[in-house]
Amino acid sequence: MSVVAIVAHHERADAPRLVREAATWLTDHDHETWVHPDDAAAIGLDELAAGDGRSLSDADLVLSLGGDGTMLRTVRLLDGAPVPILGVKLGWLGYLTEVEPEDMIAALRRYFEGAERGRWVIDDRMMLDVTVNGDTQRRWTALNEAVVEKSESGHTVRLQAIIDGEPFTSYAADGLIVATPTGSTAYSLSARGPVVSPRHRAVLLTPVAPHMLFDRTLVLDPSETVEIEVLGHRPAELAIDGLHVATLADGDVVTFVPSDDAAWFVRMSERRYHQILKAKFGLTDR
């Protein structure tokens, strides 16, 4: 028997039905299942909510029903726990989700019955550990990116980039993005950053709307520590995977290093990353 936790998008109309279908199949096949309590309350399935303060880290598998945002939230809730995530796409084509809703039960069956036959694989993704002023008590983990950005509309913020302890340059910009290869197709891409295969290990430093001639992304080896220091009188904000986590003042330093933890995604198909990219952007063969 395995324990399967379910995380679901709060606003997708088909989420309650799919949660019930998954829970019924799992229970019928002698697996224990429960829904994250916030999600159960939001979609009206309180009877399936986790009890006794259970954490997603207690599960053997997490079923994530939604889009890439729900997958990011699932990774955040796991907080580095090595639990595989099976993503079911609700809505637009995503980079992180794997399974179409109509194939959900078949995917669950394949996961639990096909381990010995190699019918699925684990796709492990690099993440970043982020701290402010060396305070390990305030540590966040990013799958896509961490962003140090301006607080005030209409103004730039001054940020000093430091690489391996040596100053690189100061930026007058809307912000600086520190991204993983997985995050290269997220915010960094919209700021003209490169697309990097998630099989690669790298750290991307991308300026957002820099008020300077140098506006290129730096692609760094993960062994190179990146620090960003806030300069001047204007405050800045720190966001992790789109979620605001801290307000920064003059002299605050944010440090970014590759995490010892990884995000584990269950992959059922042989579809390559570049084929997902091709479909996302509507590219043709010629």
Image (cartoon, helix red, strand yellow):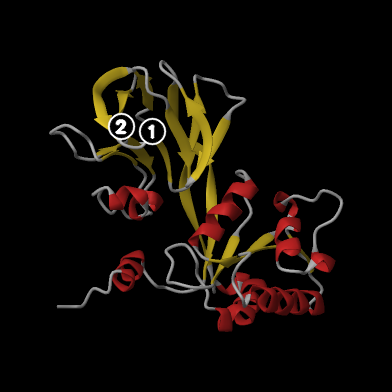
Pointer 1: what residue?
152
Q: Position of residue 268 (x, y in %)?
A: 51, 72
In the picture, residue 3 is in which quadrant? bottom right
Q: Position of residue 270 (x, y in %)?
A: 42, 73
How many numbered discs sit on the rendered protein?
Answer: 2
Most distant residue in the bottom direction: 102
Give the quarter of the figure containing the N terminus.
bottom right
Q: Position of residue 182 (x, y in %)?
A: 40, 52
Q: Position of residue 276 (x, y in %)?
A: 36, 69
Left or right of 245 in this view: 7:
right
The residue that appears at 28% across and 69% down in the rendered structure is 281
Left or right of 227 in this view: 32:
right
Residue 36 shows in this picture: yes
Most distant residue in the right direction: 52
Image position of 175 with respect to 21: above or below:
above
**Disc number at residue 155?**
2
Kind of residue at badge 1: Glu
Left or right of 88 in this view: 277:
left
The residue that appears at 58% across and 53% down in the rendered structure is 73
Towards the viewer: 285 or 270? 285
Q: Secondary structure at mark 1?
A: loop
Q: Secondary structure at mark 2?
A: loop
